[in-house]
């Protein structure tokens, strides 16, 4: 006969959890770079499987235009983030008609773009092996929640969103604070920004793009410290986000291109 043992419930002090967290208790031999995935923050489009009830990835409450966390599967109408690191890459993809998939990520100064030619049928920069090169801006951010928590994340921007990336970089460079020796440009992680989406269109159709607005100065020393640590990890390459598969949006649908009208 098994004797039932009743355990008296006591309140767990959060200080105990905080102390145990310093040694990553319970995570065993977890390697953060190898065994975890950095969330990507993307925008759900009308073509996203999370919107389609017939897809396994479908999320009941998801709507086109919402921001989407690829790891937690959460959706947001708006997010507050702290940018910590920026990296421009030329990402090599296998064509969708050949199964698609990530091939390689090339640094902006690698010279890979010089090996490409513009495909006259779809306007994509194509290598001799048939793979496509997509210029992609990566913004590493600390994503803040309403309860004071945070999470590391990456936002990738390509195609029409590259101009949003450039505007964001310009916005960060324009920030000024007054110090003992006068005005100065603070680290990017000294300021917050608000992310949401906005409808966009061209002659191919419509989609949702990023909307980025300046927020407030970071005043929490612990949040600033975590942002700085994440920035250093990203800069050293110890936190390197594997490119997420690009979403199919109306702006990317194939369209014949007049070679004489190409800028290069």
Image: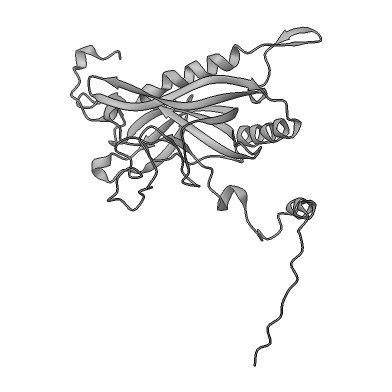
State left or right for residue 192 relative to residue 11.
left
Q: Where is residue 141? Give x, y as percent.
A: 57, 32
Instruction: Please tell me whether residue 48 is drawn above or below residue 208 in the rendered image.
Output: below
Which quarter of the image is occupied by the C terminus? top left
Q: In the image, what residue occupies the spot 76% across and 58% down?
A: 12
In percent of width and height, residue 192 lies at: 61, 25
Q: Is residue 259 left or right of residue 37?
A: left
- Above-or-below relation of 212 to 92: above
Q: Quadrant of residue 238?
A: top right
- Which residue is found at the position 50% from the left and 47% from the top? 72
Q: Give the residue furthest to the right.
A: 180
Residue lying at the far top of the rendered structure: 182
Q: Residue at x 61, y 49 (%)?
A: 32
- Decide if residue 123 is in sight here: no
**Quadrant housing residue 28:** bottom right
Task: Locate the N terminus and report the quarter of the image it occupies.
Answer: bottom right
Image side of residue 249 versus residue 244, left or right: left
User: Residue at 23% of width from left, 27% of height from top?
Assistant: 122
Q: Is residue 116 above or below residue 172?
A: below
195 or 202: nearer the viewer:
195
Q: Position of residue 241 (x, y in %)?
A: 52, 40
The colour scheme used here is: one colour
* Residue 128 in the image: above or below residue 72: above
Q: Observer-nearest residue: 119 or 158?
A: 158
Q: Is residue 220 left or right of residue 90?
A: right
């Amino acid at each position: 006969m098994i004797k039932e043992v009743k355990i008296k419930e006591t309140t767990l002090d959060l200080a105990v959890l905080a102390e145990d967290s310093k040694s990553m208790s319970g995570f065993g031999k977890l390697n953060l770079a190898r065994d975890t995935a950095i969330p990507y923050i993307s925008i759900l489009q009308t073509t996203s499987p999370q919107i389609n009830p017939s897809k396994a990835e479908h999320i009941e409450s998801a709507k086109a235009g919402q921001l989407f966390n690829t790891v937690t599967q959460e959706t947001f109408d708006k997010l507050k983030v702290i940018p910590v690191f920026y990296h421009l890459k030329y990402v090599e993809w296998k064509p969708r008609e050949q199964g698609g998939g990530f091939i390689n990520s090339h640094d902006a100064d690698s010279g890979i773009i010089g090996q490409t030619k513009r495909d006259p049928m779809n306007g994509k920069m194509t290598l001799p092996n048939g793979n496509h090169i997509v210029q992609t801006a990566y913004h590493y951010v600390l994503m803040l929640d309403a309860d004071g928590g945070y999470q590391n994340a990456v936002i990738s921007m390509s195609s029409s969103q590259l101009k949003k990336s450039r505007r964001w970089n310009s916005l960060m460079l324009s920030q000024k604070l007054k110090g003992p020796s006068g005005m100065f440009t603070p680290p990017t992680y000294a300021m917050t920004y608000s992310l949401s989406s906005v409808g966009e269109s061209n002659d191919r159709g419509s989609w949702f793009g990023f909307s980025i607005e300046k927020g407030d100065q970071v005043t929490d020393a612990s949040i600033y410290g975590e942002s700085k640590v994440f920035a250093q990890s990203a800069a050293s390459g110890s936190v390197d986000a594997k490119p997420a598969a690009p979403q199919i949006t109306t702006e990317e649908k194939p369209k014949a291109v007049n070679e004489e009208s190409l800028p290069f």
